Image (tube, rainbow, N blue to C red):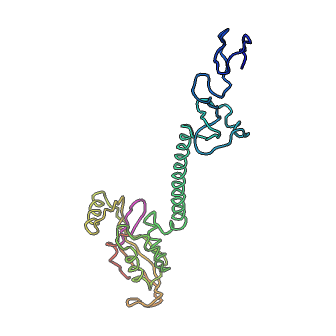
Amino acid sequence: MKKCPMCGVEVDDHATECPECGCPIADTSGFSLKGGGPAPKKSNAHSIGTTVSTGSGLTDILNDGMEEEYSSVGGSIPISLSKNDIGDYEVKHKSHIGRTIFRILLLLAVAYGAYYLLDYFVFSNKKAYSYDDAIGNYMKAINDNDLDYMRGIMPPYLSDREASAKDILNNMSSLYINSYSIDDKVFYADKDLYELQDAIKLQTSKTARITSAYDLKVTFNVLVDGDSSKLENGANLNITMNMSFIEINNKWYLLLDSYDNIDYN
């Protein structure tokens, strides 16, 4: 028998209310007041995956501040991924892709910068930025038998610039140029430039965007320092050439069609 907490009257063990005063009587049998089974035990749990035994210090930490609606029945605490967690992952994933793209672009920029510096400091002296530079490179190429200097003034529209450069070096291999002078100079008018570009396209199927050009009559003072079928070894003389130079993309090149009339004085 148990007593009513309100009036103290003894009531039946299975009574749910006092017959005298009507006060509700707590059920001490392990069953809920209105349900047909044991009262559910409250669990400090959150769903998925990794679990931590209840009653541990970590349980208290995990449960601190969590809302009851996420709790579930059981003696362990599964830890769940929320929408915020998934959103954070997506942001981090996109950030990782962005960093990878940035690194690739940075590497490309470094490679281009290295090429530019190499081109400027190492190879720029082999390029001609005026027709005087082109003549100077022509002299250096012949005197030093330097293929790079000669190839540097071969027009870019040629299919084999190296072969053309070698031909000139072979023909001039017995000469050493001491100095040069420009005896005559004719500037190309716009009409002449268009005609020259059309002729180049007809010959090579490539478009040469020529911005300016000059026909020059150049006299070289040379020393014969090798075997030659035309000249005596050790002779010092002047040779005169018709040489045309064209400007493409701010660089000057020898027009090979003009380079076919050498007068040995």
| Residue 246 is a magenta residue | yes
**Residue 122, how many percent across, how many down?**
54, 67
Examine the structure image and report whether residue 199 is included in the region drawn in magenta: no
Residue 258, x across and y down, in percent: 32, 72
Residue 31 sits above or below residue 196 on the image: above
User: Which residues make up the magenta segment?
Assistant: 242-253
Residue 208, horizontal then vertical, whole percent: 33, 62
Which of 32 and 158 lies nearest the eye of the viewer?
32
Quadrant including the C terminus: bottom left
Instruction: Report the side of 232 relative to 158 (left or right).
Output: right
User: In this rendering, is residue 36 above or below 93?
Assistant: above
**Considering depth in this image, is 68 or 139 the residue closer to the camera?**
68
Determine the residue positioned at 64% across, 18% down: 15
The foreground one among 184 and 147 is 147
Q: In this view, does 229 lie to the left or right of 43?
A: left
Q: Residue at x 60, y 35 (%)?
A: 73
Task: Indicate whether 144 appears above or below 243.
Answer: below
- Position of 244 compared to 235: left or right? left
Majority SS type along the magenta span: strand
Could you tell me which residue is drawn at 42 percent across and 66 percent down?
A: 131
The x and y percentages for residue 146 are 48, 78
Q: Quadrant of residue 238?
A: bottom left
